Image (tube, rainbow, N blue to C red):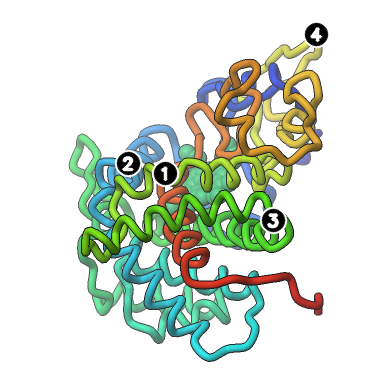
Amino acid sequence: MVFPTVVIIGQVGNKFVLGSDSDVFTMTQPITARRIVGDCTLTALSKPRYKLVKGAMMSFLKPESLQSYVSHLDEIVNAHIVSEIKEKESINAVDFMKKLTFDVTFTILFGIDRKSPKEAMFHDFDQIFKAWKQELLDGMINLRNDLLTWMLAIREENQEPITRVELIDSFIGIVIASHDTTSILLSLMMWKLARDPKIIAKVHEEQMEIFLRKRRSGEKKLTWTDLQSMKYTWRVAQELMRIIPLVFRNFREAAKDLYFGGYFIPKRWKVFWVSYGIQINENIFENPKVFDPSRFENPSKPISPDMYVPFGGGPHMCSGNKFARVEILTIIHHMVTKFEWSQGDSR
Ligand code: HEM
């Protein structure tokens, strides 16, 4: 049976949709999306299984854990940039960022650092998922201290482990959730920095200060403390996500009959939340069309979590937001301290 869809937009709408638990809204995806990601991704799981899988993800992706991966991440990013850009006259920023973030996801999150599955996967998702699944089932993939190992180790109270299908669908879900988001934001940053001399000058100053400080101290790799000091660079990312939100909509399903803003939403109707308009609303953000990263430094009025939702909010808030920040800052640090670039002819 097909149910109508209600579109909800605005600050109060964000609070209602994002802030509600699964007894009010359940996550849902159109059938076309489910065919790609499977039926057992994180968002499709029942409440106890969802808590189990999300808990495992969060224990790997929380800041305390991420701190121990910073130097490995720095190493991967450096090696990838050097090997991909060396001796090339020009690169396509979007392709480059897609490949780089793919490399990072596979190496850091999945502990797969052999070249072949990663490269094949980059070119043909469908084919490599099948191959990877088989390798995983055959025990050929070496699991170490990575997200998948953590997920394999978790148990429900009754000692029920995560099933193979849950693991594989979660894996696909994470690849999709982490890939296009991070790579597109990085491409946008490259584009913005190529076009805006004031912004690149400030980002450059911040990054060179860190670079020179490290050189003086003889410390080679980036640390968690270095990343925390990249405040302006992160504000540029925040401002880009305000003007061009990467995930600006998603579906939910009414878990029971609901009332919102004087309207009745019957049980099982779909709800489509859209964050875009609010982030460029002049009643909320001063001069919303002006690109101004400093608005996140000294906001004229506090930016509440339901006004600005680049990573969503509430129970389904992005599990990878801290990881994305670490990844983005590391990559931008290397790009800015190693290269200058400008926008070439569009193909
Ligand atoms: C700039 C990068 C990213 C952006 C803008 C972004 C944005 C979002 C948003 C808005 C949601 C909430 C969707 C909703 O409530 O309907 C979400 C959920 C999610 N994201 Fe991200 N994301 C990013 C990077 C990542 C990364 C790197 C990972 C994995 C390491 C990740 C994993 C997830 C997962 C697993 C969920 C579902 C959480 C749940 O349902 O409990 N994301 N993301």
Image marks 2 and 1: residues in contact by CB distance under 8 Å: yes
Residue type, numbered disc 1 = Lys
Which residue is at 58% across, 24% downward? 298
Q: Quick one: label 2, few (<14), some, or many (20+) residues within 10 Å?
A: some
Name which of mark 3 and mark 1 comes first in the sequence.
Answer: 3
Of residues 212 and 295, the one drawn nearer to the viewer in this rendering: 212
Q: Secondary structure at mark 2?
A: loop
How far apart, in angstroms, are the residues tagged by discs 2 and 1?
A: 7 Å
The disc placed on residue 262 is 4
- Across and down, in percent, residue 242 comes to 68, 38
How far apart, in angstroms, are the residues tagged by discs 3 and 2?
A: 35 Å
How far apart, in angstroms, are the residues tagged by discs 3 and 4?
A: 49 Å
The disc placed on residue 197 is 3
Is the N terminus in the top left, top right, bottom left or bottom right quadrant? top right
Image marks 3 and 2: residues in contact by CB distance under 8 Å: no
The disc placed on residue 322 is 1
Instruction: Classify residue 327 as left or right of residue 61.
Output: right
Instruction: Classify residue 129 as left or right of residue 140.
Output: right
Residue type, numbered disc 3 = Pro
